[in-house]
Image (spheres, rainbow, N blue to C red):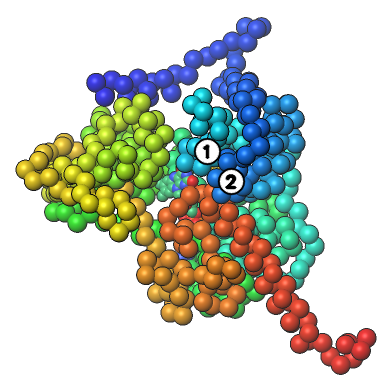
């Protein structure tokens, strides 16, 4: 049953029906979808009641001026709508695509509260900014003069890119160091292309390059330079390295070939999307085609893995999660999407062991039940004795979340203070770390979070870095002043 639905889904995507315009000319997909998107954007924007209590804006981490740009869109004033949405965000078309709107803006729309379904704010935001790119309304990045100071950004994810954008615009020399060969962080190699098309990310990166931001790709801080060396090169540093230490399952057989990390699996798929050669995909190790796939985890990464497996033509896809549907961390909308695509959710279930020595062949699992609330207030799952069962599996993807890497050790900077969770400790007023002139933002401060929060942090930390650099410059100028120059 699941297999039939899955194959149908893949086929529908492959054979998008050719439509014809009034003159009988075959319209391409872009034309059909543009016309449809405009109609939908205007229709949805017109549904906004302009209620005067913009809970949507309050619950958007960027406090976007949502009702105002919805009104402008409904009036057909798309350029003004774009300019307003661009005023508070460095990547509105990206947030519009991948924010979990059901937990943020749309989940707090008063029309949703009244039971009539939220205005689809994210889709409108995506549409107006995509339209701006198509029409050349997106301004090039033009620095305001040359301030004679430089900053180094470690990490080219949404936090780092936001700071690069805002600080370059202020006239700083901006260098971005990233260990990957392409910029974008998880926008590029984590989030799948069916949710976030990669050209959308790359055109943002290109705009920064064209504006004079200098990218040092395949440059790993800790391997290619220490933090101290970078501090010597720049007037201020931003650490925006994200969180990449995958949480592990402790169970017999977990090391069997075919039991893989979520990020390895997703990165391989994204690299194939770029047309790269990926040996571990080509030899089948990271390709779900024709396989019984089991994904372990209940967060957004797990949802991305199950939906990627469907698109790769998996025979069956099951998602094992130790709590129930109501207590999963992932977006309910993503679960619904995955279910519609034929993914089977096996709730209240945890793996106990993995079968197979040369190749994984199955997962031995046990049912769980929810006990008393733990320290976090969530009911802790505990095994239900005697409920063990087995699931066939040729590929198991571990998607249990991420913790920070040990940055002080990795960067050769023992004085860099971290919290007990390993996130970088910052003074929340200055956003500065324990090291003078070293700031931090994004997931490496918050722990695994969201793109929109990384953008918000990037916006906030740019303000703090700018203030710091102005003071630094004026101190430098006053110490350089000679008695003659002061007199002059
Ligand atoms: C699979 C997956 C799917 C997700 N889906 C969504 C979603 O749909 N919506 C959403 O809002 N959020 C999603 N998230 C979360 C979101 O991607 C992150 O919250 C966001 O990318 C964090 O931004 P960041 O800039 O802090 O870090 P990142 O995006 O992780 O970027 C950090 C960058 O630092 C670089 N780096 C790390 N260490 C070094 C070093 N030593 N030297 C040089 N460079 C280094 C990395 O290569 C990377 O490019 C998802 C996360 C994952 C894992
Ligand atoms: S940035 Fe995200 S939360 Fe804010 S309006 Fe856009 S989609 Fe909604």
Horizontally, residue 47 falls left or right of residue 391, namely right
Residue displayed at 19% across by 38% down: 393
Furthest residue in direction right, as rendered? 488
Question: Under 8 Å from ligand 2: the CB of mark 1?
Answer: no
The numbered mark at residue 398 is none
Q: CA distance from mark 2 to mark 1?
A: 9 Å
The numbered mark at residue 108 is 1
Label 2 with label 1: CB-CB less than 8 Å: yes
Q: Residues within 10 Å of mark 2 (few under 14, many from 20)?
A: some
Q: Looking at this view, is 271 or 155 the one in front?
A: 155
Horizontally, residue 176 falls left or right of residue 325, namely right
Residue 344 locus on image (x, y percent): 27, 31
Furthest residue in direction bottom, as rendered? 483
Q: Is residue 82 visible?
A: yes
Q: Quadrant of residue 50?
A: top right
> Compared with residue 184, is residue 69 higher up or lower down, i.e. above or below?
above
Q: Quadrant of the N terminus?
A: top left
- Circle 2 — which element? helix
> Compared with residue 25, is residue 465 higher up or lower down, i.e. above or below?
below
Residue displayed at 60% across by 23% down: 40
Q: Looking at this view, is 401 or 396 the one in front?
A: 401
Q: Which residue is mark 2?
A: 58
Horizontally, residue 260 falls left or right of residue 141, namely left
């Amino acid at each position: 049953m699941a297999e039939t639905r899955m194959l149908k889904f893949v086929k529908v995507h492959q054979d998008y029906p050719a439509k014809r315009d009034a003159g009988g000319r075959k319209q391409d997909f872009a034309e059909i979808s543009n016309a449809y998107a405009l109609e939908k954007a205007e229709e949805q924007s017109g549904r906004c009641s302009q209620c005067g209590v913009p809970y949507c804006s309050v619950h958007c981490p960027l406090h976007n001026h949502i009702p105002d740009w919805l009104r402008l869109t409904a009036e057909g004033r798309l350029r003004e709508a774009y300019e307003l949405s661009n005023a508070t965000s460095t990547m509105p078309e990206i947030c519009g695509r991948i924010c979990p709107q059901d937990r943020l803006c749309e989940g707090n729309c008063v029309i949703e509260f009244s039971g009539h379904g939220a205005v689809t704010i994210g889709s409108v935001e995506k549409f107006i900014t995509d339209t701006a790119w198509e029409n050349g309304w997106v301004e090039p990045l033009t620095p305001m003069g040359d301030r004679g100071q430089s900053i180094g950004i470690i990490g080219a994810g949404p936090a780092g890119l936001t700071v690069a954008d805002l600080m370059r615009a202020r006239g700083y020399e901006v260098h971005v160091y990233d260990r990957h060969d392409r910029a974008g962080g998880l926008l590029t190699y984590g989030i799948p292309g069916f949710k976030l098309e990669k050209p959308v990310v790359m055109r943002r990166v290109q705009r920064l390059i064209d504006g004079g931001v200098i990218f040092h790709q395949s440059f790993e801080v800790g391997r290619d330079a220490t933090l101290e060396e970078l501090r010597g090169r720049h007037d201020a540093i931003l650490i925006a390295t994200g969180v990449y230490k995958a949480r592990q399952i402790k169970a017999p057989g977990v090391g069997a070939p075919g039991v893989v990390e979520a990020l390895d699996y997703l990165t391989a798929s994204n690299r194939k999307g770029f047309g790269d050669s990926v040996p571990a995909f080509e030899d089948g190790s990271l390709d779900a085609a024709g396989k019984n796939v089991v994904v372990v985890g209940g967060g957004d990464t797990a949802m991305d893995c199950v939906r990627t497996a469907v698109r790769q033509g998996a025979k069956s896809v099951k998602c094992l999660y130790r709590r129930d549907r109501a207590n999963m961390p992932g977006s309910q909308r993503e679960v619904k999407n995955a279910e519609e695509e034929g993914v089977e959710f096996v709730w209240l279930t945890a793996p106990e062991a993995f079968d197979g020595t040369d190749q994984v062949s199955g997962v031995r699992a046990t049912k769980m039940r929810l006990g008393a609330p733990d320290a976090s207030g969530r009911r802790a799952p505990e095994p239900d004795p005697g409920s063990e069962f087995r699931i066939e599996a040729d590929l198991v993807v571990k998607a249990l979340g991420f913790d920070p890497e040990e940055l002080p050790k990795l960067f050769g900077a023992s004085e860099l203070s971290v919290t007990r969770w390993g996130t970088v400790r910052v003074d929340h007023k200055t956003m500065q770390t324990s090291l003078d002139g070293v700031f931090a933002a994004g997931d490496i401060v918050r722990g695994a979070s969201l793109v929109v929060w990384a953008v918000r942090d990037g916006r906030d930390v740019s303000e703090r870095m700018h203030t710091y650099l102005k003071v630094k410059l004026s101190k430098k100028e006053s110490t350089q002043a000679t008695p003659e120059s002061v007199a002059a």
